[in-house]
Image (spheres, coloured by chain):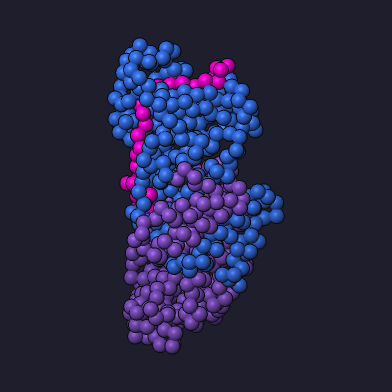
Chain colours: A purple, B blue
Amino acid sequence: MRNVTKDNITDVFMGYMGDDVNPRLREVMGSLVSHLHAFAKEVNLTHAEWEQGIAFLERTGDISDKERHEFVLLSDVLGLSSLVDMINTQSEGTSSSVLGPFHISGAPPLDIGGDMKGRFEGPVLLSEGIVKDTDGEPIEGATVDIWQTAPNGLYSSQDPDQDTYSFHGLQTTGPDGRYAFTSVKPVEYEVPTDGPIGEFFEACGRHAWRPSHLHFIVKADGFKSLVTEVFPDDDPYLDKDTVFGVRDDLVMSYQQMPAGSFPDGFALSGQVDEAYLRVDFDLVLVKG
Amino acid sequence: MRNVTKDNITDVFMGYMGDDVNPRLREVMGSLVSHLHAFAKEVNLTHAEWEQGIAFLERTGDISDKERHEFVLLSDVLGLSSLVDMINTQSEGTSSSVLGPFHISGAPPLDIGGDMKGRFEGPVLLSEGIVKDTDGEPIEGATVDIWQTAPNGLYSSQDPDQDTYSFHGLQTTGPDGRYAFTSVKPVEYEVPTDGPIGEFFEACGRHAWRPSHLHFIVKADGFKSLVTEVFPDDDPYLDKDTVFGVRDDLVMSYQQMPAGSFPDGFALSGQVDEAYLRVDFDLVLVKG
C-alpha cells in the first residue's frame, strides 16, 4: 500500500488477511502483530536494534536441533512459558509448570517401584504419589513421563557420559493410580549459557539458576494433559527461579527417612540400608 | 518466585534485571516483554498454540543459513521491517524501505555507467541518479550497493543458474554524486513460500507478491546509511506489497525511451539500438 504509515500499518496487516481465515488465527495474529507494532513504536526501535534482534533469533536457530530447544529456553527465560502455564492452570488441578528444553520423547517403560538411579552416586530419593481426578479418585492407565538431571546437573541430552534415556522413565498407573520410583536427589542447575540465552543473561545482569526439581508429563484418557515439576522446600533458588516455574502447590518436603526404613516393593528394596529421602506428590488431573 | 502470578510476572521479570543494566536495554526489553505477556493474556494463549509458535520458530531457524534469512522475511511479512523503516525515516531524506532477506555483502565494484545485465535477456533498463544531501549538494565518495532479481524473479542466492554476484554491484560516486548503470527491468516476484513463511501465507489467506524494484544501500561518511528501493509506477502490486515496502517517494516512472537514443558513457553504449527504459532516482541522505 503506497500510503501505509506508522499509524495504519497494523490495520493494513489485518486487511491483507483473507476473508475465510480461521477466526482464532485471526484473533491470535491480530493481537500478536498489534503488540509487536506497538512495541516498535513505543521504543522507537532503531535499525541497529532490529538487526541485533534478527541476529539473536538467527543464532538461536543455529544452536537449536532435535535435542536442544533454544527457542523453548528463550520463552522460558522471558516468562512466556510460565505465563502460558498459569493462564491454563485450573484451580482444582495440580499447577502446570515449564516443560523446559530437555524433554525427549520415547522414554523406556519403568515398573512401578522401578529405579532411575542406576550406576550414579548421590542421595537416594524415593518419589511416589497418586494420579487422581479432582474428586480424589485414582486414575488407572495414566502415563507418567518422568525426567531429571543427573547428579552433575546435566540432562542426558546435554551429557555425552549419559545414555540417551538416563534419568528418564515412563510409568503407567494401575487401579490404585500410583506411580513410584527411586532416583537420586535432583540438584539445582544453571540452564545452558553457552548460547544466545547466555548472552541475554549477561546483558540483563541475570543468573541462570533453577531450583532442583523432578519433571512430569501426565496423560490419561478423558483428562487434560499435565506438564509439571516438583521442588524441594529447602532449595535456595525457590524465590528466584530463572524460568519463573515455582508454584506453591509444587513445593514439597523431601523428608529425611532413617536408615533401615527403606520399604518393600521397590527395585532397590533390600539394597538401601542407609538414610534416604522421600517425597510424596500427588498429581491431580482435570477432566476434559 | 513462589508467588509469581499472571498479574505480576512482568514486574518479576523486570525485577530480575541487574541494577547496572544498560538503560536502553532495560527500556527495550521492558517494552518487549510487557507486550509479549499482554499478548498471551489477551488471547489466553493455549499450550498447543504456544507449541505451534515454538515449532514455527524452530522451522524458521532450520531453513535459515548465511544466504537465506527467513527471520528477516518473517519480520518483513509481519510489517515490522517496514514499521522500523518508517519510524527511522526523516522527512528530508529519501524514505527507507525493506532490506529484504536476499542482500549479500561483498558485491564487486561496478564502474559508473557499468552493466549488470550481462548475458541475461530482458528489456534494457538504464538507471541513474544523484546521491545528495538534504540541501541538494552532491555527495562524493558515497557507495551505492545495488541488487535485484534476474528476469526469472530470483535473486542470485536463490538460483543455482546465477553466479554469486549476478545482478549485484557496488558503485562509488565521484564529485558529481552520480551513480548510473544498466540492467534489465526488474520483475514482480513472490517471496519464498517453500518455508515457514509459505505456511503463514497459506494460513492467513495472503499472497506472496512484491512489486518489482531495485534495491539500494547507500553509505557516505558523515551521513546516515540508507536502505531503500525504487518501484515503477505501473506495477500491479504497488498497493498490495506483501512486505509493506512501497512509499510514495520511492515510486518512479520507468520512461520508455525511443530506439536510437541510448546515451554515451555507458558500458552498453553503441550496443543498444532498440527502445529501452530509463529511471531517474536521486538518493537523499540525512546528516548524522
Q: Which quadrant of the figure has residue B274? A: top left
Question: Residue A70, percent across and down?
Answer: 47, 54
Question: Residue A218, percent across and down?
Answer: 40, 74
Above or below: residue A277 compared with residue B192? below
- Residue drawn at point x = 53 percent, y = 42 percent: B85
Q: Nearer the viewer, residue B81 or A207?
A: B81
In this rendering, does residue A264 appear at all?
no
Above or below: residue B36 compared with residue B110? below
- Confirm whether the magenta stretch covers residue B182: yes
Question: Residue B129, percent across and down?
Answer: 50, 24
Question: Residue A67, percent across and down?
Answer: 40, 55
- Confirm whether the magenta stretch covers residue A182: no
From the viewer's perspective, tell me whether residue B117 is left or right of residue B244: left
From the viewer's perspective, tell me whether residue A131 is left or right of residue B9: left
- Residue drawn at point x = 32 percent, y = 46 percent: B194
From the viewer's perspective, tell me whether residue B1 is left or right of residue A214: right
Name the quadrant of the N terminus of chain B: bottom right
Above or below: residue B69 compared with residue A165? above
In this rendering, does residue B181 appear at all?
yes
Give the total of numbered labels.
0
Q: Which quadrant of the figure has residue A227? A: bottom left
Name the quadrant of the C terminus of chain B: top right
- Residue drawn at point x = 59 percent, y = 70 percent: B7
Above or below: residue B113 compared with residue B5? above
- Residue drawn at point x = 48 percent, y = 82 percent: A92
Q: Which residues are magenta?
A: B173-201
